[in-house]
Image: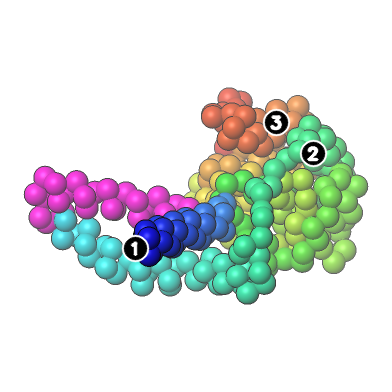
Amino acid sequence: MPSLHMNFLQYLQNGLDILLVWFVIYRLIIIIQGTKAVQLLKGVTIIIVVKVLSSLFGLHTLQFLMDQALTWGFLAVIIIFQPELRRALEQLGRGRFFSRTSPGGVNDRTDIVESIAKATEYMAKRRIGALISFERQTGMGDYIESGIPLNANLSSELLINIFIPNTPLHDGAVIIQGEKITAAACYLPLSESAFISKELGTRHRAAVGISEVTDSITIVVSEETGAVSVARNGNLYRELSKDELVNLLNTELKSPEESTTSKWNWKVKRNG
């Protein structure tokens, strides 16, 4: 009987140990979801798979290279992903590591698209410069931290007021997460592409720049011409009509569950 009791306690201890490990892994996945660390995780997975296959097929040189990549990769991860690691430790310190979280999303995409279209149309007619970026799968936390936090419900009136000239928040970009305006006056990286027309200014270069490093959708309203452009995947789609903008947003802001493809086939000018 004592032996049976000890075996039961051992099984219970092992089961609890496994559950805790899986819970920690799950929480880590939730934390890195929507950040650049997701791409890192995919890369590490590929390296591990290649290492296993090279070991099975006796490819010693390839196996040696994969071993070196895994050995030195840990140090590289700490250096490259220092902001994500810092944010994870901050969440742990605030007690959010063990709190329930659910991925944010657009609850009413139609209203949001209409608000964006209404605001851009108003600003375009009056040649009010604007830069509006939608966060998608790749996190934009670093760029959000460079601006002024708002965490406000999205509306056309608020967007217009933000970009009115000579107001405190009109310089920089607005970043939208789900149905919230998360921050304003944010700094976005400028593109170094030589294919961008010389007639385009800093806003357009910033829009293309952020689209090169994230999967965001960024809308630009030109202060000089009032033209509306959209940056996506390193490309700049210029001089869009209101209907084209609405069609784009309705397509691109779908969740992965709603759409497995995201294409829009317009004959518009790219990158000048």
Q: Position of 42 compared to 171: left or right?
A: left
- Distance from the alpha carbon under mark 1 to that under mark 3: 64 Å
Between marks 1 and 2 in the image, the one whose residue lies nearer the viewer: 1
* Residue occupied by mark 2: 112
Q: Amino acid at mark 2?
A: Ile
Q: Main secondary structure of the magenta part?
A: helix
- Considering depth in this image, is 50 or 131 the residue closer to the camera? 50
Q: Residue furthest bottom?
A: 93
Q: Position of residue 4 (x, y in %)?
A: 37, 58
- Distance from the alpha carbon under mark 1 to that under mark 2: 64 Å
How many other residues sit within 10 Å of disc 2, few (<14), some (14-19) or many (≥20)? many
* Residue occupied by mark 1: 3
User: For residue 61: magenta?
Assistant: yes
Which colour scheme appears in the figure?
rainbow
* Residue shown at the point (27%, 68%) measured from the top left: 71
* Residue shown at the point (38%, 65%) measured from the top left: 2
Mark nearer the N terminus (1 vs 2): 1
Q: Which residues are magenta?
A: 36-62
Above or below, comparing residue 160 to residue 109 in the picture: below
* Residue occupied by mark 3: 250
* Residue shown at the point (66%, 37%) measured from the top left: 253
Q: Quadrant of residue 117?
A: top right
Q: Amino acid at mark 1?
A: Ser
